[in-house]
């Protein structure tokens, strides 16, 4: 059927596999010269020196010497798989994007899951956020949802991203610690960044040690915009809900597995698919209007906030199925380049300052990671529709553009790609006006309310895990001042939590005189717990 053909065409388009695996081929060098002996270099006499003339040796070694590219500056450790997205319920009331209106059509996808802080060789089960990046090769161009398995983020403004990442990465003087957030610099930064408190609760919860990729949720995090055929806009949050449900490891398991099998998550995905199985998620949306959002006591442009599901339920409208492993990790998983700015007509951005900054960063980073403005030509990054424009040349250009004309408008080219007007991507005409300022909106200023909401929604055992995780991680901070400042923030989220962590660290419960901005509801059992913790 058409849907299957689209998926097959994609895999054909991406199949530039070298013929080394075809039966009956002879070894050649990269210029096509048939190789007589690949195991001995050319030398003067049996025991003599190697000759410069040995072009086979030089080509083989030179290529090897240049095999590595920089790992991703974040999310370096990851694994990906192919599959498809299929819509069950049209969202045409909200958007004219074909991928969200054509029920039953299979859109090919490539998804990559990752940790954030560790290097390419670090362990899968570290306590960390998981990247959940999905590239959909739609009929209207690539649409990437570059999300995480946690619905909020540490910071509200992209200008703070380099600081956040520098604080969490190994320290610059000794490159310690690898793949763990448990160190002074991270908590020193977090203690200075109250907006991180909601995310901090998630990161210390069981969500940060998933059992498998297909047992974690995915979130687009930001509020995006959907625009329908009549030009009317709604706001939207994107969700992936694992069909197997959300499941986590416990910390002791996560640590032991990290030692025994650093590939635990990628191996599980690989083996599931290799044995004919699939990984599956429902796709969901929370749709609401700007007018509704203006009534809430948080700002939907603030990526440290969720839209609670009791305010706006998640409607499940489609499914993602991953069913094909990569043929080559480097060519596909390493070279895939996701970008938040890859949206299709009918899907648009909002003014979330974190999203706006990301829309700059992803294209920029590909230029140094993949090394050339032509990275879009890599098979894994190519859209399934024809690319047609006047961009030219550059390092490693593969496309051979024909003809004399490389500009627009013109009357000379025989086949002129035309502008599509309203049939192309038209930015939603959101009204913007204001004074140029470096400020944070007042509506972004509650940093503890949703952190507390999260804590209050946890079961007793989940709360215990959060408290233990904070104790463990903060006990790794060598600087007492960092630990004490962190306890101050915890006290503003919940006294019992702060007391439990303080006890574990051998510190006094910090003063909570100004600690309850939104009003904290301590139940009788919480009061008892508090007494026990102190
Ligand atoms: C990579 C998610 C914030 C810059 C990634 C990846 C994911 C992700 C999933 C890995 C993509 C892959 O698998 O290849 C997020 C989420 C964010 C966030 C959900 C917040 C809501 C930011 C911000 C910036 C940023 C604020 C910069 C201003 C980058 C860069 C990469 C990256 C440079 C490496 C991309 C590459 O080399 O291919 N991010 N990120 N991210 N992110 Fe973010």
Image (tube, grey):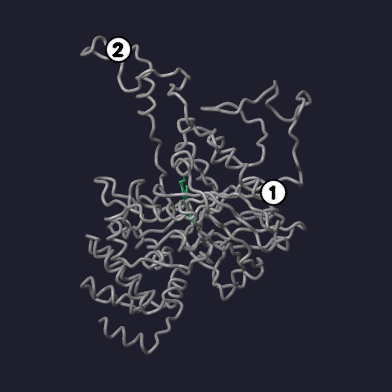
- Badge 1 crowding class, 10 Å Cα cut-off, few under 14, some 14 to 19, many 20 or more, is few
Instruction: Spot the residue most to the bottom.
Output: 524
**Position of residue 500 measured from the top left corner of the image (x, y, whole percent):** 28, 76
* Nearer to the camera, 176 or 52: 52
Count of marks placed on residues: 2
Labels 2 and 1 touching (C-beta < 8 A): no
**Position of residue 39 measured from the top left corner of the image (x, y, whole percent):** 32, 23
- Which residue is found at the position 41% from the left and 58% from the top? 129
Q: CA distance from mark 2 to mark 1?
A: 57 Å
Residue 533: which quarter of the image?
bottom left
Residue 232: which quarter of the image?
bottom right
Q: Quadrant of the C terminus?
A: bottom left
Q: Which residue is mark 2?
A: 51
Could you say whether the residue bearing mark 2 is in a helix, strand or loop? loop
Where 315 sits versus 68, above or below? below
* Nearer to the camera, 494 or 271: 271
* In the displayed structure image, the side of residue 135 where residue 248 appears, left or right: left
**Position of residue 288 measured from the top left corner of the image (x, y, whole percent):** 64, 67
Could you say whether the residue bearing mark 1 is in a helix, strand or loop? helix
């Amino acid at each position: 059927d058409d849907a299957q053909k689209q998926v097959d065409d994609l895999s054909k388009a991406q199949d530039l596999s070298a013929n080394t695996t075809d039966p009956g081929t002879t070894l050649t060098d990269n210029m096509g010269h048939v190789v007589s002996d690949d195991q001995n270099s050319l030398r003067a006499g049996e025991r003599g020196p190697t000759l410069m003339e040995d072009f086979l040796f030089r080509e083989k070694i030179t290529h090897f010497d240049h095999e590595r590219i920089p790992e991703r500056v974040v999310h370096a450790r990851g694994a990906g798989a192919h599959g498809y997205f299929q819509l069950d319920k049209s969202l045409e009331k909200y958007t004219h994007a074909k991928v969200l209106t054509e029920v039953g059509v299979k859109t090919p996808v490539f998804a990559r899951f990752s940790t954030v802080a560790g290097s390419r060789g670090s362990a899968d089960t570290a306590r960390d956020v998981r990247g959940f990046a999905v590239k959909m090769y739609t009929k209207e161009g690539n649409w990437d949802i570059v999300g995480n398995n946690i619905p909020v983020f540490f910071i509200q403004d992209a200008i703070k991203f380099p600081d956040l990442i520098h604080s969490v990465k190994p320290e610059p003087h000794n490159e310690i610690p690898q793949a763990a957030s448990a160190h002074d610099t991270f908590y020193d930064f977090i203690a200075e960044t109250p907006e991180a408190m909601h995310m901090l609760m998630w990161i210390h919860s069981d969500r940060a040690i998933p059992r498998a990729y297909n047992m974690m949720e995915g979130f687009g995090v930001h509020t995006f915009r959907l625009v329908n055929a009549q030009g009317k806009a709604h706001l939207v949050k994107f969700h992936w809900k694992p069909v197997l449900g959300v499941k986590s490891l416990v910390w002791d398991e996560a640590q032991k597995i990290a030692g025994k099998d650093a590939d635990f998550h990628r191996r599980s995905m690989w083996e599931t698919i290799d044995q004919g199985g699939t990984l599956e998620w429902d796709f969901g949306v929370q749709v609401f209007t700007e007018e509704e959002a203006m009534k809430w006591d948080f700002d939907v442009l603030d990526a440290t906030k969720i839209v609670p599901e009791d305010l706006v339920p998640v409607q499940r409208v489609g499914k993602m199925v991953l069913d094909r492993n990569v043929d080559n990790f480097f060519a596909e998983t390493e070279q895939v380049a996701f970008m938040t700015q890859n949206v299709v007509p009918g899907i648009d951005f909002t003014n979330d300052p974190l999203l706006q900054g990301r829309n700059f960063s992803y294209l920029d980073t590909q230029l140094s990671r993949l090394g050339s403005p032509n990275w879009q030509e890599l098979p894994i990054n190519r859209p399934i529709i024809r690319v047609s424009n006047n961009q030219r040349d550059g390092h490693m250009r593969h496309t051979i553009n024909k003809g004399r004309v490389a500009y627009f408008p013109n009357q000379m080219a025989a086949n002129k790609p035309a502008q599509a007007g309203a049939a192309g991507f038209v930015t939603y005409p959101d009204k913007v006006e204001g004074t140029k300022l470096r400020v944070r909106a007042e509506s972004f200023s509650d940093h503890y309310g949703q952190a507390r909401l999260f804590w209050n929604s946890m079961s007793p055992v989940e709360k215990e895990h959060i408290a233990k995780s904070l104790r463990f991680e903060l006990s790794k901070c060598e600087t007492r001042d960092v630990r004490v400042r962190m306890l101050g923030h915890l006290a503003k989220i919940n006294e019992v939590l702060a007391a439990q962590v303080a006890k574990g660290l051998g510190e006094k419960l910090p003063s909570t005189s100004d600690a309850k901005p939104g009003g904290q509801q301590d139940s009788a059992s919480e009061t008892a717990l508090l007494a026990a913790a102190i």
